[in-house]
Image (spheres, helix red, strand yellow):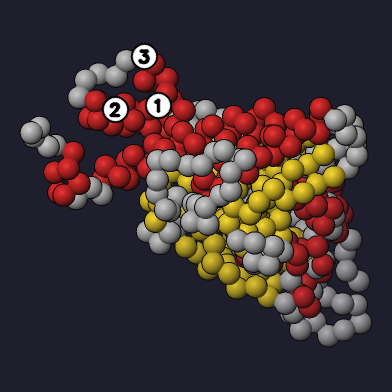
Amino acid sequence: MRSGFPYFIAGALVCAGAIIGLPLDGGVGGLSVERAHAFGITINLPGTGRKPSYRRGRRRSGKKATSSSCASTRWSTMQLGEKQIATNNQGIIVSFDNDGNIIVSLQMKTPLPTIPENRKVPVTLNFGRHGTQNLIGVVGESTNMIILSGIAAQSIVELMRKARSVRVTFINNDYCTRLRGSGTAIDRVQAAANFWKMAKKDIIDERREERAREEHAKRTESMAKTQQESADKLNGIRPKGNLKKDLARNMPSVNIQYFVPGSEATGQMWVDWDVDENKGPILRLNFIDIKRKLDIKAEIIALSLEPVTENCNKDIRKPMAPETSPACRLVRGLLIAEAWGKKAQSKGLRRQFSKTVLYVEGDKDSKISTSVNFILYENGAVAAQIEKRTHGFPRRFNFTMANALELARYVEDIRVDAAKNIKAGTMTDADLDNIFKVPD
């Protein structure tokens, strides 16, 4: 008969250990102060020297049972600075980086100072019947953390939601932990990451708008300087104040207001000219994005300046020549729409009506066309409209009659300025000889 004394001694030791708080699962207890300062939290890694468990009634073959070898602790979330993390204090942390992307951190039992930061490390995660993942991690800022990010992190968290436990193996580390409650905790971290992305996007948009303002100011200053230099060259003297004021009409800071049909939203547009490699000299109508109200162009309508001429028939009572340039046709169309508006208001007309004044480019059968339209509203209001139609899809920009008249004058100023510059740059020796003649 066996004596009961050894069992009595073992029971006493177990009770004494429970009273003084010794860990009974073979774990390493808490992190040291130095390691806690390394990444701000305390994680108790499960021990790997647990006694093998055996199924009752079976032969003891020495094979471990996976379910009993994993430490059982519940997952939860906690706030770490401005970010939220999910962990069960058993070596796995789910969080997100500064871009709001999910990352998974695996803790080593002991730091390895010989491994440099950003060194790649092979990692194996066994999710039981859900499969095994062989991935490549990176040593984090703290040498006892392996970081998994990108697609690898996404695949891991998806498996963590499904599996009951996971065994982690890398370098000299091999530990197992339960995943009970990890799905809910990961969902909370994912929600916090999405909110982080939205907040960062707002900051990025603000910075982008600030850069757009700065670029707009620099471009305006540069164009003013360039036109000032051009005036000095043409006149041979420093321009007077009134000449500066006239030149200011060519600057993008001179904006004309427009509005979108069927909406109370208003925006601004400006006009300039350029020489395109394929189209030649063109007049550009730059419509600024209404939502941002910055020099971010929502639409650019380019009209040909050819044939280039300083004179444009602005008398709407006379017929227009067939070879009239699209830029001249735009001026004429806006003047006609403004005259029709005066006629409608003098007669007190109040009904919905619209009519195409003229086609600036193309015609009604063209796939791409630009036209000036006249709009009459039921309350008696009138408007001029520039419509750009591309393969059946229209973009419309409405102007009050006062703004339409101002736009016509603005376009004419830019058109004449372009004609003078183009003529000056393309004059032949014979043209110059005719200008500089010796009097008889």
Residue 247's label in the rendered image is 1
Q: Which of marks 3 and 2 is nearer the N terminus?
A: 2
Q: Residue 352 lies in what quarter of the image?
A: top right
Residue bearing mark 2 = 231
User: Tag 2's secondary structure?
Assistant: helix
Residue bearing mark 3 = 241
Q: Where is residue 359 in the image (x, y as percent from the top left)?
A: 63, 54
**Structural distance between the alpha carbons of marks 1 and 2:** 8 Å
User: Tag 1's secondary structure?
Assistant: helix
Counting the numbered discs, the total is 3
Q: Earlier in the sequence, mark 1 or mark 2?
A: 2
Q: Where is residue 304 in the image (x, y as percent from the top left)?
A: 47, 53
Q: Is residue 295 left or right of residue 131?
A: left
Of 111 and 52, the residue lying toward us? 111
Q: Please say if 424 is above or below 360.
A: above
Q: Which amino acid does label 2 sit on?
A: Ala
User: Tag 3's secondary structure?
Assistant: helix
